[in-house]
Image (cartoon, rainbow, N blue to C red):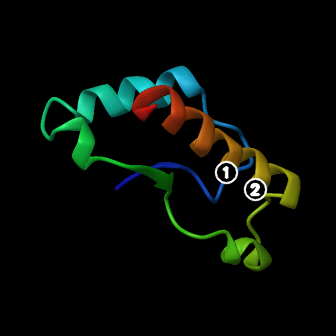
Amino acid sequence: MLGLISSKRPEIESGDQLIGRIKEASRHLPLENLALSPQCGFASTLEGNLVSEDDQWAKLRLVVETARKVWG
């Protein structure tokens, strides 16, 4: 599992950068053995992380969109 999406920062990651990092990881493991996810859950946002609910949903959509591009 590649935890490439930050659950601590509100900035939305670049889909192209995520795909590049997935391709880099696939040099070490077969692509079919890899998966994409946030680093961890978003529950810690109540403790001071400035990730809004809208940002959380945007990040989850990014996971889905990127996974579809990479794995079909």
Label 1 packing within 10 angstroms: few (<14), some (14-19), many (20+): some
Going 16% across and 38% down the picture, which residue do you hit? 30
The residue beneath circle 1 is: 60
Label 2 packing within 10 angstroms: few (<14), some (14-19), many (20+): many
Q: What amino acid type should be assigned to the residue bearing mark 2?
A: Gln
Direction from residue 40 to residue 3 in the image, left or right: left
Direction from residue 24 to residue 12 in the image, left or right: right
Would you place residue 34 above or below residue 67 in this image? below
What's the distance in space between the residues labelled 1 and 2, CA to CA? Answer: 6 Å
Viewer-closest of 64 and 38: 64
Would you place residue 47 above or below residue 25 in this image? below
The residue beneath circle 2 is: 56
Contact (CB < 8 A) between labels 1 and 2? Answer: yes
Instruction: Report the disc number at residue 7.
Output: none
Label 2, secondary structure: give it: helix
Quarter assignment of residue 31: top left
Would you place residue 31 above or below residue 33 in this image? above
Would you place residue 67 above or below residue 16 in this image? below
